[in-house]
Image: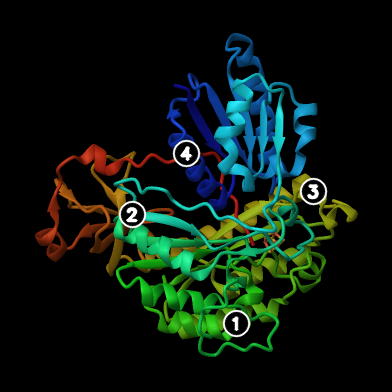
Amino acid sequence: MSSYAITTFGCQMNVHDSERMHEVLRGAGYTEAEASVADVIVLNTCSVREKAEQKLRSEVGRLAKQKRNQRDLVVVVAGCVAQQEGERLVKQLQGIDLVVGPDNIPELPRLLEELAQGAPPIVRTVFDTETPKFLTALSVAGASKTAFVTIMKGCDERCSFCIVPYTRGPERYRPSAEIVAEIAALVAAGVREITLLGQTVNSYTDPTKSLPPAPDANESDPDESEFAALLRAVAEQVPDLARLRYTSPHPRHLTRSLIRAHAEVGVLARHVHMPVQSGSDRLLKRMIRRYSRAEYVERTAALVAAVPGLTLSTDIIVGFPGETDEDFDLTLSLVREVGFKGLFGFKYSERPFTPARKLADDVTEAQKSERLARLFELSERLLGEHLAGLVGSTQRVLVEGLDKEKGELWSGRTDRHEIVHITGAAGLDLAGEIVDADIVRNNKHSLQGELSAAARASARPRVAPEKAARRSLPLVVSATQGA
Ligand code: SF4
């Protein structure tokens, strides 16, 4: 029987797609193996930034050399670069046998079978725009306490720097009943926390029109969606769900109905990752983000006012074409004003098929590096101050598993997304539990807490620590964000 290995580049959507590829391949009788000995190597690619695409090209070059000694090795390129480049990949790079787009993952076993029968390299990158299909979890690994559920795919925004509308196609939404049913099944199998996934997750509209309108929904507002109604339906219909998150939302759809849902739906985490990209209105316009700095600040402030203590994180691009020192200073001042507790910063890189290609990439590499360093310095300081302020408090932590590097330490997150490593739990099984931890120290990006006496008294003893701790996840090479 053939074996396979998957390497994942990019965002949570790709991680989710890789999990589904594992299931599709296992279901067809393939077994997972180390990449050095696998018969089929799948590279699930990202094209959001040039660096990720370069990584793919060097990896394919390495595999082409490996093929000289392993003639039967099958190299599959999946994901956004596959969708973007299609035939060109096979023509330009030696050694690729199959190029498969995100919407064609269920066809993987059939396509591999065609190759086994002697077919020449195959390219299959067709969007399912007519009858969209959403990949759902076929099974849940025993130790998995968190899971992603896709609610929409594609993007109708046209941010000038972004290739996603090209690689993932137009927005398509999943029926709300299917979403709720998948979450209910995952929770019944032991999952505690669900993250709803979509490129602009909060533009969600139920294609079956079966959700009652959410309170404060304003149907005449073009930014309104049915996302708040979906959150309410999930909370009501899956009462055993411990925590609900989503990624990545677009600031445009942070409407009153969504803010009210955050205030009223208890299962929603008190953390939102809300990409802003820049603090300069001039650049937001050039990026075609369709909101102003003032609107972003006003909406996120209303969210924080509705949910005291809610934390925000964001994505920022530095060095977008035309970005001046003044523009960048506005970004820094926005970061301070909003008080983000986490930040993904990226240097702008020109992507094919994007409107920003018409703008001169006129910020030097040195300027981009210098700005990124200053941005990270500020965000690290803000996070450091925030974490230091939590020392001495007691935090509720959803424990996700044993810290792989530190062995005996359990790790999890608070509902505000702070990472907590828990001591004082030797011999106990905390996987999936929500426990109180007394915070004794702050690290650079996390907290250290002592398991509370009450939690220790009621915890299960650990039976098979190795099995409980390890979850078979695809290798993630780098992380980028969506909207
Ligand atoms: S940045 Fe987000 S919202 Fe903008 S085009 Fe890309 S995926 Fe869509």
Q: Are the residues flagged by discs 2 and 1 in contact, CB closer than 8 Å?
A: no
Tell me the element at label 1. loop
Q: Which residue is mark 1?
A: 255
Point out residue 85 in the picture as x, y percentages from the top left corner. Answer: 76, 39
**Which numbered disc flags the more N-terminal residue, 2 or 3?**
2
**Which numbered disc flags the more N-terminal residue, 3 or 1?**
1
Question: Which amino acid type corresponds to the residue marked 3 in the rendered image?
Answer: Glu
Q: CA distance from mark 2 to mark 4?
A: 18 Å
Q: Nearer the viewer, mark 3 or mark 4?
A: 4
Tell me the element at label 2. loop
Q: Which residue is mark 3?
A: 350
Quadrant for the C terminus in the image: bottom right
**How dense is the environment of label 4, judged by Cα within 10 Å: few (below 14), some, or many (20 and up)?**
many
Ligand 1's image quarter is bottom right
**How dense is the environment of label 1, judged by Cα within 10 Å: few (below 14), some, or many (20 and up)?**
many
Quadrant for the N terminus in the image: top left
Q: Is residue 7 above or below residue 255?
A: above
Q: Nearer the viewer, mark 2 or mark 4?
A: 4
Q: CA distance from mark 2 to mark 3?
A: 38 Å
Residue 337 in the figure: left or right of residue 427: right
Q: CA distance from mark 3 to mark 4?
A: 32 Å
Point out residue 244 in the picture as x, y percentages from the top left corner. Answer: 41, 67
Quarter of the image where one finds residue 53: top right
Q: Which mark is residue 351?
A: none
Q: CA distance from mark 4 to mark 1?
A: 37 Å
Q: Is residue 44 above or below residue 164?
A: above
- Name the residue located 59 percent from the left edge and 9 percent from the top edge: 69
Tell me the element at label 3. loop
Q: Is residue 48 above or below residue 21?
A: below
Question: Which amino acid type corresponds to the residue marked 1 in the rendered image?
Answer: Thr
- Name the residue located 57 percent from the left edge and 86 percent from the top edge: 256
Q: Which mark is residue 145?
A: 2
